[in-house]
Amino acid sequence: MSDIIDKLLDKIVDVTGILYPFTSTIKNITDNKNELRDLHRELDREYKKNILEGRDLDDFQRAVLISSINQSTKKFYNQVKILNVACNNMNDSADPNLLDDDWLFYFMNKAALISDEQMRNTWGSILAEACDDPKICSKSLINTLSLMNKNHAETFKCICKFRLVNMNIPADDKDRISYYPVIFFGKNAQGYANHGLTNRRILELEHLGLIDLDSNKEFVVYTDLLKLRDRKNSVEIIGDGKVEIGNITFTYDGFLLQKIIENYYDSKIMDFNIQVWCHKGYQVYRNGKKQNGE
């Protein structure tokens, strides 16, 4: 694993031009914020000295240059913390050489601005996953992530509680959206609000481009037989050419992001969905047993 981490750090240095001494002992540095700052200050000390002693600079120019260095300290800290998360989450099969140079350069530049620890964990997980599957995150998703705050992240995680995988789509088909957040928002808005899914929060995720929302009618999957499953149940829904799956769907960027969100199970969620489908007149089978919607 240490060889894989070294390859990732070497590639980041080569692609981004970050000249600081990244090593496989990066965790020992990032565990102590003061040590990291001391390292960075030591590297910048001579440069600052040259600025202060520069005869061709006025006071304003000196202040601007020193301010930019201080900002770079914080950016460097954010980048290293995200790298630490990535290094701790990479699989043995990871290959940093799979990372596209332009993608990595864009990722690291945006990562420099992520100060929230929870969001840094998400960024680090994505970088680790990208070393296995470079298509796990698009540039547009990187941009969206840079705009997300903690509330956005919590709302998106909440939506992922309601997702089901479409078993009609082969697991190796990575270009089609195979997960649906089955949320019948129009049927029980208050119930979903109790889970933290208010109309305002949902709209914010739609504006970020992670979900599509239609409060007036439901999205459909065009099929006579839709097979879905969660962690503990398989469900077969027999429709008349189409099956309604609620008021929210993932965009492709949302579909990519949900892949790193941990699985969640709540039997009440499946119970409610089955009840709605039965009331719509579909034939519903849960783990092979026909349901009556009661």
Image (cartoon, rainbow, N blue to C red):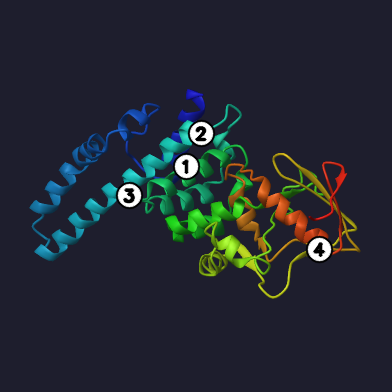
Which three-letter amino acid code belongs to the residue tagged 4?
A: His
* Tag of residue 124: 1
Mark 1 or mark 3, which is nearer the start of the sequence? 3
Which three-letter amino acid code belongs to the residue tagged 3?
A: Lys
Query: Does the CB distance between marks 4 and 3 fall below 8 Å?
Result: no
Q: Residue at x 42, y 42 (%)?
A: 82
Which mark lies nearer to you, 4 or 3?
4
* Tag of residue 89: 2
Between residue 163 and residue 87, name the one nearer to us.
163
Which three-letter amino acid code belongs to the residue tagged 1?
A: Gly
Between residue 86 and residue 72, name the one nearer to us.
86
Query: Dot 3 corresponds to which residue?
Result: 75
Q: Residue at x 52, y 59 (%)?
A: 196
Q: Secondary structure at mark 1?
A: helix
Residue 257: x and y in percent read 58, 51
Quadrant for the C terminus in the image? bottom right
Residue 203: x and y in percent read 55, 69
- Residue 225 visible here: yes
Q: Is residue 120 above or below residue 42?
A: below
- Residue 210 visible here: no
Query: Dot 4 corresponds to which residue?
Result: 279
